[in-house]
Amino acid sequence: MSAASLPLLPDQRLAAGAARLATRHAGRFSAETVQALLTDSYSLLASTAQVRTHLVVLAERFTAERLDALAHVQGGPGNGLPRVLFVCSHNAGRSQLAAALLGHRAAGRVTVSSAGTHPAASVEPFIAQVLTEADVDAAGAFPKPLTDEVVQAADIVITMGCGDACPIVPGRRYLDWPVADPDGAPLAVVRGIRDAIDAHITELLSSLPA
């Protein structure tokens, strides 16, 4: 069955996103698999979203990340880069800072993801501001739930205050970065958290292949 002939999802824009993703992954995943994953991604994000204006777009981006991780898990052709996953409770502060900073400083040397064990409805105030101050692109950040394929695909899992809810997968390299939670913190404190995370990233980059 082609992507065009699949039954429409509840939102026609969501169906259009499924068609785009199915075309991009033709020969790797069936259109049915793509549609099911997009529907699941939409439902997961909708369960915590307070504003749904851009939810279809975010669901498509989230699904694209999950499909890339699933392809890696299944041994499909990939870029061979180390995959780093940051996990915190809400994916609204620390893990968003860490993912953005590592993606910026690694300059294409790693594949970076972030997720939350109990994702918030939106990213914490001041996160975008302190990233912009560090010349890091903060556009497009949104809280995402932790999914099996993203954890399975990670080479390095870095936990940041999610406690017993943090995932444990045998064979992965685990690090825990004990940095403060920016939830409700003033701007000056959030800047300090950013700098503390950046120091950890310097150490991490020195341990990765050149």
Image: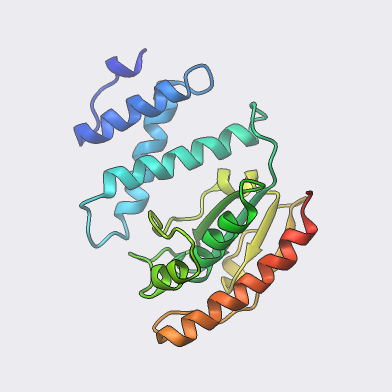
Count of labels in the image: 0
Compare residues 204 and 182 and report the one nearer the observer: 204
Q: Quadrant of residue 141?
A: bottom left
> Please, which colouring scheme is shown?
rainbow
What's the residue at 53%, 57% (across, down)? Answer: 114
Q: Seen in the image, is 200 located left or right of residue 146?
A: right
Compare residues 192 and 156 and report the one nearer the observer: 192
Q: Is residue 111 above or below residue 145?
A: above
Q: Where in the figure is residue 137, as x and y percent of width and height?
A: 45, 58
What's the residue at 35%, 13% (across, down)? Answer: 2
Quarter containing the N terminus: top left
Q: Seen in the image, is 204 located left or right of residue 6?
A: right
Q: Seen in the image, is 177 located left or right of residue 6?
A: right
Q: Where in the figure is residue 138, as x and y percent of width and height?
A: 42, 60
Compare residues 144 and 136 and report the one nearer the observer: 136
What's the residue at 58%, 51% (across, down)? Answer: 112
Q: Is residue 96 above or below residue 151?
A: below
Q: Is residue 119 above or below residue 182?
A: above
Which residue of the protein is positioned furthest toward the top in this rendering? 1
Q: Where in the figure is residue 44, as x and y percent of width and height?
A: 37, 51
Q: Quadrant of residue 175?
A: bottom right
What's the residue at 47%, 79% (across, down)? Answer: 182
Q: Where in the figure is residue 46, as x and y percent of width and height?
A: 29, 53
